[in-house]
Image: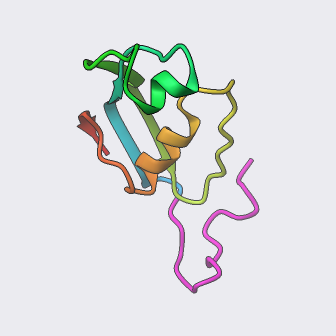
Amino acid sequence: MASPFEGNPAPDGLRTDPSRPAVVLDAVSVTYQVRGGTADSLRSWLFGRGQSSGRVEHEALREVGVTIPQGASLGVIGSNGSGKTTFLRLIARVLKPTSGRV
């Protein structure tokens, strides 16, 4: 059964073509550099005591691949820290992936 929205003009007058992808993520990974270590108290954090000087890598997304057709709706569900915002920032091209292609 065909979608009732298939081939209908979009609000801006453009036609959508469900056979063509609107967004393609190909093996996309995003890694952040975060400060390592923790401070024991506010005072030690403010004055740099008890804090590691190194950085730790945090992998927000690992080799994500998805194709979203034109005119499709997408829901992103996940627990806190699962990479939902990172995923949406990639789609909006606000964030560049560490590896892979958008």
Measured from the top left, where is residue 69 in percent x and y? 51, 50
Left or right: residue 76 versus residue 102 is right
Q: Is residue 70 above or below residue 66?
A: below
The image quarter containing residue 6 is bottom right
Residue farthest along the bottom direction in this orientation: 13
The image quarter containing residue 77 is top right
Q: Which scheme is used to colour this image of the protein?
A: rainbow
Left or right: residue 49 versus residue 68 is left
Q: Is residue 66 magenta?
A: no
Q: Is residue 58 above or below residue 89?
A: above
Measured from the top left, where is residue 68 in percent x and y? 50, 46
Q: Which residue is drawn at 43% across and 55% down?
A: 20
The image quarter containing residue 102 is top left
Q: Residue at x 47, y 26 (%)?
A: 45
How would you classify the magenta stretch by its main secondary structure? Answer: loop
Measured from the top left, where is residue 88 in percent x and y? 52, 47
Q: Does the magenta stretch include residue 16?
A: yes
Please tell me which residue lies in front, 48 or 35.
48
Please tell me which residue lies in front, 58 or 16.
58
Q: Residue at x 71, y 53 (%)?
A: 2
Magenta-highlighted residues? 1-17
Please tell me which residue lies in front, 7 or 90.
90
Label total for image: 0
Q: Residue at x 45, y 57 (%)?
A: 92
